[in-house]
């Protein structure tokens, strides 16, 4: 059996801007995981996951090209991840095999409600790592990210890939999104020869991913209990912003880029006052974007989460697309985090027992 795990993620800053090519975000990986286990099978394979309403899918191989085919017309992150890894294996002369794949997740509240920690990205990254391990295909963190992004883009093309970068690299991550239009053109030409291998090995325009040092501020996370759809929110914000005021959206992107540049520098210098200032600035920028687009990013519960954190000397904001899910607080050493979390509970905000997760950095 081959087993691989990938962590969930939280956005610290840069939401919405990062979906545009060449724009930045800062994220963290957290210590809740999706684990994928792969075992040898014969004649057919089975994918088992709590993420499926039917619990399991059976898959076969097309006679003409040995490509994975599921029993129904169905594409999801796991299936897409298997296909991209197996294309790499074929290009390197490997033979296809059948296997069973089991997915288990810690990224919910125990009753199946997702916590907004990026289950789609984590399951894609974990599947890439597990299937590559099954075939003996060595991958560094960047190759894992690239294959997972290509797999994810085939299923849900609206995301930035920042969540995938955090899950693949772990720790505190500075991320700049690639040119997705270029990437899709290149991907379309990888169906013969060693096209995918060359694409994964090559430089992607605008893409940057790097680990950042941990700041002298502790991370606390509150969950509103209200689920949010990232694709729907991102599409709504983009459509609303373009419909009402293109100039304001352009100004938001520029201001976000300046803010994130200063935040990354502050993280590198462990300038906690500047980090807090930039988190507050990013929250204001998202509030302006919400007004421009007409889409609610900071819900009343998320606003209360931030207010309570401020009352206890921390800085806080929504995390990710907003509209529910989680908020984050960065707390200086003098913050009484127990009192802050108790106040969150009184406001029906659930503190999550999460820490930043690091794995040893895997580089070429």
Image: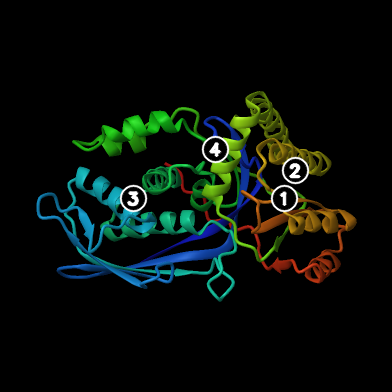
Q: Mark 4–mark 3 contact, CB under 8 Å?
A: no
Q: Residue at x 51, y 46 (%)?
A: 165
Q: Nearer the viewer, residue 330 or 121?
A: 121
Q: CA distance from mark 2 to mark 1?
A: 9 Å
Q: Relative to the observer, which residue lies in front, 112 or 127?
A: 112
Q: Please indicate whether residue 117 sits to the left or right of residue 180 in the image.
A: right
What distance separates the C-alpha of mark 4 from that of mark 3? 29 Å
Contact (Cβ within 8 Å) of mark 2 with mark 1: yes
Q: Which mark is residue 138?
A: 3
Which residue is at 46% across, 48% downward?
Answer: 362
Question: x, y (%) of residue 354?
Answer: 65, 64
Report which residue position mark 4 lands on: 19
Q: As displayed, is residue 279 above or below residue 100? A: above
Q: Nearer the viewer, mark 4 or mark 3?
A: 4
For residue 176, say whether it is visible: no
The crowd level at tag 1 (other Cα within 10 Å; few <14, some 14-19, many 20+) is many
Question: Which numbered disc, 1 or 3, marks the residue closer to the eye?
Answer: 1
Residue 212 in percent (x, y) is at: 63, 43
């Amino acid at each position: 059996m081959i087993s691989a795990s990938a962590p969930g993620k939280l956005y610290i800053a840069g939401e919405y801007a990062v979906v545009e090519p060449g724009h930045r975000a800062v994220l963290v990986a957290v210590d809740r995981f999706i684990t994928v286990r792969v075992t040898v099978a014969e004649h057919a394979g089975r994918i088992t996951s709590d993420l499926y309403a039917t619990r399991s899918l059976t898959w076969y191989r097309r006679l003409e090209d040995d490509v994975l085919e599921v029993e129904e017309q169905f594409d999801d992150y796991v299936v897409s991840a298997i296909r991209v890894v197996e294309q790499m294996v074929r290009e390197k002369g490997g033979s296809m095999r059948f296997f069973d794949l089991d997915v288990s997740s810690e990224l919910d509240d125990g009753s199946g409600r997702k916590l907004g920690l990026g289950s789609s990205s984590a399951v894609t990254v974990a599947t890439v790592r597990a299937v590559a391990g099954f075939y003996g295909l060595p991958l560094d963190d960047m190759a894992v990210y690239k294959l997972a992004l290509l797999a994810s883009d085939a299923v849900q093309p609206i995301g930035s890939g920042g969540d995938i970068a955090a899950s693949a690299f772990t720790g505190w991550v500075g991320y700049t999104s690639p040119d997705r239009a270029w990437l899709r053109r290149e991907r379309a030409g990888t169906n013969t020869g060693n096209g995918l291998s060359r694409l994964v090995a090559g430089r992607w325009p605008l893409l940057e991913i790097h680990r950042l040092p941990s700041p002298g501020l502790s991370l606390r996370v509150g969950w509103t209990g209200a689920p949010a759809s990232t694709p729907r929110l991102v599409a709504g914000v983009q459509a609303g912003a373009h419909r009402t005021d293109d100039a304001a959206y352009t100004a938001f992107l520029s201001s976000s880029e300046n803010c994130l540049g200063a935040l990354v520098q502050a993280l590198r210098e462990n300038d906690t006052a500047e980090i807090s200032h930039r988190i507050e600035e990013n929250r204001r920028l998202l509030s302006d974007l919400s007004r421009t687009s007409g889409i609610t990013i900071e819900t009343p519960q998320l606003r209360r989460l931030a207010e309570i954190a401020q009352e206890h000397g921390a800085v806080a904001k929504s995390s990710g697309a907003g509209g529910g899910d989680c908020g984050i607080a960065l707390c200086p050493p003098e913050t009484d985090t127990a009192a802050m979390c108790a106040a969150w509970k009184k406001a029906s905000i659930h503190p999550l027992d999460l820490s930043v997760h690091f794995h040893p950095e895997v580089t070429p």
